[in-house]
Image: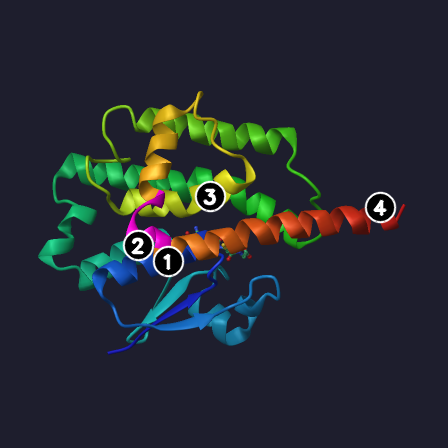
Amino acid sequence: MSTTIYKADASPPARTVLMIADLLGIKYNGYDINPILREQDTPDMTKKNPMRTIPFIEDDGFCLGDSHAIILYLLDKYGKPEHSYLYPTDKQKRATINQRLFFDCGILFPYLRTIMALTYTGRLTELSKSMIRNIESGYRMLDTYLSDSMYLADDVMTLADLSVFTTMSTLHGLVPIDSTKYPKLMNWFINMSEKEICKKINQPGAEQHVAGLNALMENNKINQKSKL
Ligand SMILES: N[C@@H](CCC(=O)N[C@@H](CS)C(=O)NCC(=O)O)C(=O)O
């Protein structure tokens, strides 16, 4: 049996997969891919993951892309009864977790992905007003999701929290959560930040990601000025 996780430690969705793999006790090989150098575009990698995104996995020859699909698969295959809190069988809780995962995949992370793509290709020097507006609308939705429970889908941490948290830890580094506007989100963020799994696996990559994006934006500014 062998599991390979193709990853970059700075990548939020890769950090989600790494945290779930760790929580489930999966012994995996980590294979680093540099998205700035487009190492995911080689014919071999593209065959394994036509989306050309990070992360993706190869599990006993089975290839799968998209962190949200991957964590559901890993839990299904490797989860033991003691992991059921991450994805409880209650139908409404599960539906809520799924909705939060789709929210991360379809709304929140794409706000960040646009910033990443424009920064990595030298076109972004600072966040635009509309980028900040989008991110704030994400914060507003999350704050509302946290109205009825301590975590995003339950009163215990689930897959939804880990997935959204990795995106949020880079976003918060770029657009700090205003605790007067989004108090529930701020409390959740602090609470998640204090979890051992997040400190060990998410925090170093998140810090690296935020510092890298800020440095690249500064660099883009200098390059654009020198062209004037
Ligand atoms: N929905 C995907 C998003 C993955 C994604 O976009 N990852 C970024 C790195 S953080 C990437 O691969 N970017 C390269 C590209 O978009 O071509 C997931 O959750 O895995």
The quadrant in which residue 138 appears is top left
Q: Earlier in the sequence, mark 1 or mark 3?
A: 3
Disc 4 residue type?
Answer: Lys
Residue bounds of the magenta highlight? 193-199
Q: Which residue is mark 4?
A: 225
Mark in front: 4 vs 1: 1
Verify whether residue 140 appears in magenta: no
Disc 1 residue type?
Answer: Ile
Q: Which residue is mark 3?
A: 109
Q: Which residue is mark 2?
A: 197
Residue lying at 22% horizontally and 57% vertically, measured from the top left: 75
C-alpha separation, residue under disc 2 versus residue under disc 1: 6 Å
Residue 180: mark: none
Judge left or right: residue 37 versus residue 198. right
C-alpha separation, residue under disc 1 versus residue under disc 3: 19 Å
Judge left or right: residue 7 versus residue 145. right
Disc 1 element: helix
Q: Main secondary structure of the magenta part?
A: helix
Q: Which residue is mark 1?
A: 201
Q: Is residue 170 above or below residue 128?
A: below
Verify whether residue 198 appears in magenta: yes
Q: Residues within 10 Å of mark 1 (few under 14, many from 20)?
A: some
Task: Determine contact: label 1, label 3, CB under 8 Å.
Answer: no
Disc 3 element: helix
Label 3 CB, ligand 1: below 8 Å?
A: yes
Disc 4 element: helix
C-alpha separation, residue under disc 3 versus residue under disc 4: 30 Å
Q: Is residue 190 above or below residue 159?
A: above
